[in-house]
Image (cartoon, grey):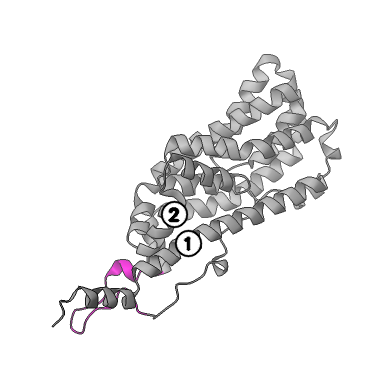
Amino acid sequence: MESLLRETPFAEDIEISLPFGMIEQPQGDKKPTDASPVGAGPPSTSHRDSISNIIKRLGAVAPLAISWSILPLIGTAALGVFMSTVGQWLRSADGWGPPLYIAGFALMSGLAIINTWMQALLGGFAFPLILGIPAALGGCVGGVLVGFAVSRVASGDRARKVIQDHPLWQAVYEELLGGGFWKTLGIVTLIRLNSPFALTNLAFTATRVPLLTYVVGTLAGLAPRTVAVVYIGSTLSDFGDATKPRWLIWTSIGVTLAIIIVISQLANRAIERFASSHDPRKESNENAASEPNR
């Protein structure tokens, strides 16, 4: 049991961020976009936001993100200790067991108290496989809706306004989440394959991903690993005998690397387009071509 908690095969208890070192920076002449002519006064605040200013502008989003990074570690460890007791209690609840499990799953995951993979393991341990899988998936959807409601209240429109005030960030956002339904659904599904559940809820809600896309993409992305973990839970006669399957570890690592590569490539493409459209040499050539020949 202790080895299972120390070496979690999923990324929910690890903060995963896009490695910006993999994202190419725009090439060409280095000309600040917020440069102002002499005597024109200081540059616009939106172009010289410091990290502290951005955090202030985000309001409750920043402290919520910090708390949602820490709380799942504590809650998951606590559930691990009492997993056998909770599982036996759910079994003895007869017909009330699955509804109570789904409601608890939704609240605990939506409020970032317990990770989804540990609760899925509980579902497989407490119920037959045919019941544990739909119950765990139902809990995931409920957790998404709870997380959406909390994140919407906390974030408001702050994150979108911060992104809109930075043209490069806006370009990357449009490339990743600003497309049509199917493209956005694909990105949400890809990210959901292996990412921190609560923090991803916050990010998608704060950036105003449509609710339908958000729910369907989450369900599609979480389904493979949820089914796998519920199956593992169903094979346990005693939760203390749980061991970590090697195939699940390597699959998790491979999926994480694939997500990083795809997102990095899309971000690079957005940055290249942005750099091309804001190239001062291109603008000067276009201006020269538009002047009438004398």
- Give the class, few, some or many, for how many residues have Cα within 10 Å of label 1's Cα (few <14, many ≥20): some
Q: Is residue 107 visible?
A: no
Quarter holding residue 79: top right
199 displayed left or right of 120: left
Q: Position of residue 239 (x, y in %)?
A: 81, 36
Q: Which residue is mark 2?
A: 175
Q: Position of residue 154 (x, y in %)?
A: 41, 46
User: From the image, which quarter does the N terminus lie in?
Assistant: top right
- Give the class, few, some or many, for how many residues have Cα within 10 Å of label 2's Cα (few <14, many ≥20): many
Say whether marks 1 and 2 touch (CB < 8 Å): yes
The question of residue 261 being in magenta is answered with no
The question of residue 44 being in magenta is answered with yes
Quarter holding residue 290: bottom left
Alpha carbon separation for disc pair 1 and 2: 8 Å
Tell me where the magenta segment starts and ends, as one range.
Answer: 31-50
Q: Amino acid at mark 1?
A: Arg
User: In the rendering, which numbered label is found on residue 93?
Assistant: none
Quarter holding residue 115: top right
Which residue: 42% across, 67% down? 51
**What secondary structure is found at the residue carrying circle 1?**
helix
Q: Position of residue 276 (x, y in %)?
A: 38, 69
User: In the rendering, which numbered label is found on residue 269?
Assistant: 1
Which residue: 47% across, 52% down? 176
Q: Nearer the viewer, residue 230 or 291?
A: 291
Q: Chief secondary structure of the magenta span?
A: loop
